[in-house]
Amino acid sequence: MANLAFDIGHLLAGGMLVLSFVLIYQDRITAMLNVFAMQAVALALAVAWQAITHHAPHLFVTAAVALVVKGFVIPAALHRIVRRLGIHREIEQVIGGGPTMLVGLGLVALSIMLVLPVVEGVDPLAREDLAFALAVILLGLLMMITRRNAVSQIVGFMSLENGLVLAATGAKGMPLVVEFSVAFSILIAFIVFGVFVFRIRERFDTVDVSALDAFRGERQEQL
Amino acid sequence: MALIFDLAAQGLQVFLVIAVAPLLLGVSRKVKARLLRRIGPPVLQPYLDIWKLMHKEAVLAHNASWLYRVAPYLVFAAIWVAAALIPTYSTDLPFSWSADLIAIVALLGTARFALALAGMDVGTAFGGIGSSREMLIASLAEPAMLLVAFTVALLIGTTQLSTIATQFAGASVGLRVSLGLALFAFVFVAIAENARIPIDNPATHLELTMVHEAMVLEYSGRHLAMIEAAAALKLQLYFSLLVCLFVPFGMAINDKSPVALALGVAAWMAKILFLAVLLPIGETAVAKMRVFRYPIFLGGAFAAGALAVFLLFVSKGF
């Protein structure tokens, strides 16, 4: 029975990591948003499973926040933004799909090598959650680096935050106040991003952030 | 007496795999035709095709070397040996000890090498591009396949197929994301290796993008019959391997009673026929891919395999 508890935890946390990879791989924007929503649902399930196995009812609140805010509200809002920007059918030019995957695999290996020796002797599920969480965070960062579309970069940031929540719940949970403030700061960040995306579009007629490069200071000095 | 029975059981497996292989091809062609609202050829058509080709004259190009004549038999023999070794209905056959996952990958590699050489032998343009593309696909698919083998080996501690099947059927393995990922990688590799859509279209001789058919374009008569039979066997081999690695339930495990063996054969037939129906459904749902997208497709399989190995490391520790 204890083995089953570990296996389900492993399945959910591992599923989040796999979905992070799907996010890096996916080049259609609407499909990417759906994958992001799936990752948030997997996060909610993983946190809820932690709540059950560790008898920590306050984690259910975290799970509910993750499910409602990141599983439904933010993806729905992003879908709306994408449709209003008229890029919902766009296929994004991902910079080097294959190399990016290899770098991602390297990051996963790195985070496993890093976390496992540090948390020797801790309960195996927590240890695993920490390793996976670090990997999800790094993959989120990688996605923010390799994507050129502003909406994809937002998704990368949000999936990075999914990793943070997974790490926090693995470490015996965090105070509820902190959790709520994180959730709200994410929402605020999301609103700011949303405003920014529309401002970028208004200015440059595109949400491809490479268009911003031409307006960097050092480039103008060269001219 | 026991030895005779054992040899008979092994012999049954050796002939069962070859007897069933064209049927699977026929079933999947029939299902595909029905999905496209065609009637399609009868299910037994592949047997008739092979029979017909056996009795036709084999035409050789003037500059064909001995290699060109030997290759079809070599390909067929290597694939038949590999197919006969994979545990299909019982884990306890006299030659089970030699059914090693890496040995089977090596046998398939040998067959592919022979076929690629034969494709280039006559010196036609089509044979050349077919061989070069086949090698491209192989160089991408084999690492992914080996990672699948590593995943299973890390989990069970061996690459011997009958032990793997026994352990998995015993349900002592538990719920593993790694196995799901390995299955995903394996399906991608199997699609690429069997020249199915989206990598290659097995039903065409007219496309510039064909791979397997381009290599064997020059063959005719009994040589072509060997190659067609080998292709059918290879499909059956991948189905059996999938069944043996991921759903070995129903197989006769260390049990030599005739009832258990009969149940094993029935379960195996049901499972591979189900896969033969599933394959064309998957094929009609996707479009053929551009050649330049193969690395991305098989890179996904590689990533899934590598991820499966990493996840196992996390849960087991070093």
Image: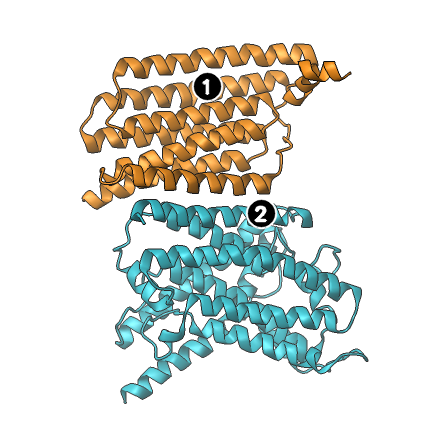
**Residue B280 in the image, given as x and y percentages of width and height:** 55, 54
Tell me if I can see residue A208 in this picture: no
Query: Is disc 2 in the same subunit as disc 1?
Result: no
In the rendered structure, are the residues bearing label 2 and label 1 in contact, judged by CB atoms less than 8 Å apart? no
10 Å neighbourhood of mark 1: few (<14), some, or many (≥20)?
many
Residue A80's place in the image compared with B24, above or below, is: above
Residue at the image position 70 percent from the left and 78 percent from the top:
B68
Q: Residue furthest bottom?
A: B1
Q: Residues within 10 Å of mark 2 (few under 14, many from 20)?
A: some
Q: CA distance from mark 2 to mark 1?
A: 30 Å
Between A116 and B20, the one nearer to me in the picture? A116
> x, y (%) of residue B40?
62, 60
- Give the residue number, with chain letter if any, for mark 1: A74
Q: What mark, if any, has residue B297 been given in the picture?
A: 2
Q: Residue at x 22, y 45 (%)?
A: A3
Q: Judge whether A54 appears above or below B76 on screen.
A: above
Q: Position of residue B235 (x, y in %)?
A: 53, 64
Q: Amino acid at mark 2?
A: Phe
Of the numbered discs in the image, which one, if any, rests on residue B262? none
The image quadrant that residue A51 belongs to is top left
Q: How is the image coloured?
A: by chain
- Residue B261 rendering spot, x and y as whole percentages: 31, 73
Depth check, front residue: B246 or B114: B114
> Which color has been applied to chain A in this rendered view?
orange
Tag 2 subunit:
B
* B284 versus A93 height, above or below: below
Tell me what hue chain B is rendered in.
cyan
Q: Is residue A59 visible?
A: yes
Residue at 32%, 35% in the rendered image: A129
To which quarter of the image does residue B152 belong?
Answer: bottom left
